[in-house]
Image: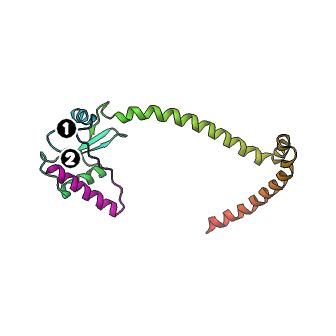
Amino acid sequence: MSALQALNSLSDIERKHALRQARLFPFYVAPDDIEEVPKLRDELGLKSDIVEIIAINGKRGWWRRYDSADGSKYGVVDLEKWVDQVRMGEAEKHKIPEGALLSESKEEPKVEPEVTPEQEPEKEPEQEPEAPPQDEPEQKTEKEPDHEPEATPSATPETEPQQETTESPKEPKTAVHEEL
């Protein structure tokens, strides 16, 4: 009965926050059928005979426990007070033991190699093409005929003056938008 009451209370709290479009941390049910749950209970010192409600912040390395008075207080009002305490940073924090959360060790190696190589090559090519067109537009015209001798030279001179013409009117438009 206490597990059902806790789930209903948390559901009501979540619904209330969703209706007023307020941000709220997610709620999860973690039954003992999952392999990692008993291990997590042991590492955090949680009881297995009652429903335990905890808040975990894996990024900051802390967790908070709801004191249910041995499983008798799972009402909406009591749980909502605790949720507000967690949101406001008032509830008692406990440090997460090392190795208790498996996702931290798995995510770190994947994120670092992927982000670093992709960002560096993208920034360099973007910066190089932007600088030469602004500094020397005539050199581009000379380079393009080498690559495409017949079709590109006729299209390139027409395109460059149009771009310069469009750039000049854009600057006053930007100034007008800033004033509005």
Q: Determine the image quadrant of residue 122.
A: top right
SS assignment at label 2: loop
Question: What amino acid does circle 2 point to?
Answer: Tyr
> 171 or 48, which is in the foreground?
48
Instruction: Please state the horizontal and vertical placement of residue 90, each as a whole percent of the image.
Output: 26, 49
Q: Of the residues under marks 1 and 2, which one precedes in the sequence? A: 1
> 98 or 2, which is in the foreground?
2
CA gap between label 1 and label 2 equals 11 Å
Residue placed furthest toward the bottom = 180
Horizontally, residue 49 falls left or right of residue 103, namely: left
Residue placed furthest toward the front = 33
Instruction: Please state the horizontal and vertical placement of residue 170, each as a whole percent of the image.
Output: 71, 61
Q: Which residues are magenta?
A: 1-28
Q: Which residue is mark 2?
A: 66
Where does the C terminus fall, quadrant-wise? bottom right
Does the segment drawn in magenta span residue 172?
A: no
Does the segment drawn in magenta span residue 20?
A: yes
Q: Residue at image x 63%, y 40%? A: 123
Q: Residue at image x 66%, y 38%? A: 124
Few, some or many residues within 10 Å of mark 2 (<14, 14–19, 20+):
some
Q: Which residue is mark 1?
A: 46
Question: What amino acid does circle 1 point to?
Answer: Leu
Please tell me whether mark 1 or mark 2 is closer to you in this view. 1
Instruction: Please state the horizontal and vertical placement of residue 98, each as a whole percent of the image.
Output: 31, 30
